[in-house]
Amino acid sequence: MSIYAIGDVQGCYDELRRLLDRCQFNPQVDQLWLVGDLVNRGPQSAEVLRYLMSLGSAATVVLGNHDLHLLSVAIGTRQPHSGDTLESVLNAPDREVLLDWLRQQPLIHASQGYAVVHAGLLPQWTLTDALARAAEVQAVLRGPDYRDFLKVMYGNTANHWQDSLTGFDRLRTIVNACTRLRLCTARGEMEFSHKTAPIDSPSGYQPWFDIADRAHQDTVVIFGHWAAVGLLLRPRIIGLDTGCVWGRQLTALRLEDRQVFQQDSLTRPTIGDL
């Protein structure tokens, strides 16, 4: 059995299938771990969701910010952004099946010494901490009152973790860390406006994965979300967002030997927010 970790697909279905052919992926024996942002900006979001659903236990995904955006747009609490390409899901005959499957997915997947998360982990969080906090959000998203949370999920406060956080502020902070984090201070104060290369980081902030003495540094963290960083391969940090939807590549990493597989983008880049 091989495990292939795959970067942000964002509706690039044709590239995903070609990439899996390059990997000689066999769903009978192999596993896919996807870092989230399955949908949006690319042309075939519904096809991506249907395919991953069809793989059953052979595919493990975590939620990204674009996936949560789709859920919010679907219930009418958010307006589509310019450049969104969510119509294939929103207008699909199996729309409710796709959306229900999506909101059942976790924020973090952990197995065999790895953790998969869309954006990052706060430096103060151990893996045990992160999984427990992600589980709080997952329980709400999977529950009957998920719409109430989606209505208040957006916002930049609180911008750092405190154990004393409660209610929607607590859940929002967990979501922001798992799906939006790029930069933070050594104390874990998050900065959300920066989206370009780390060299341009504002004073006092660093990429979360460069913070010294991270509490989870005994875990190999696999993430996406930051196309400006691109492919990042360190002993305990793996970044896989190589900007397929922006005209670059979709990347898979076979974990047992760290062999990289890439498929060039077939998608004309859209104008919109990373």
Image (spheres, helix red, strand yellow):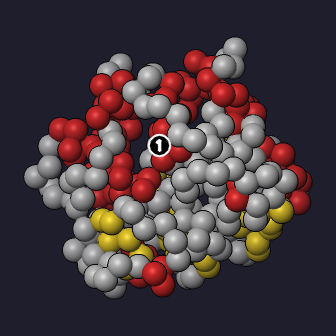
Quarter containing the C terminus: bottom right
Q: Amino acid at mark 1?
A: Pro
Q: Position of residue 136 (x, y in %)?
A: 30, 41
Direction from residue 184 to residue 270 in the image, left or right = right
**Can residue 48 be seen in this snapshot?**
no
Residue nearest the viewer, comparing 271 with 127? 271
**Element type at mark 1:** loop
The answer to whether residue 165 is above or below residue 138 is below
Tell me the residue at 33%/66% (across/down): 191
Quadrant position of residue 151: top left
Position above or below: 144 against 107: above
Q: Report the residue at 48% width, 38% height from top.
A: 69
Q: Is residue 194 visible?
A: yes
Task: Name which residue lies at 10% across and 52% down.
Answer: 164
Give x and y (percent) for residue 127.
36, 63
- For the N terminus, the image quarter is bottom right
Q: Is residue 187 left or right of residue 3?
A: left
Whole-percent x, y for residue 155 in the image: 30, 47
**Disc 1: which residue:** 106
Q: Splitting the image into 4 quarters, where does residue 135 fall?
A: top left
Q: Residue at x 44, y 53 (%)?
A: 179
Residue 59 percent location from the top left of the image: 66, 44
Q: Residues within 10 Å of mark 1 (few under 14, many from 20)?
A: many
Q: Is residue 48 left or right of residue 103?
A: right
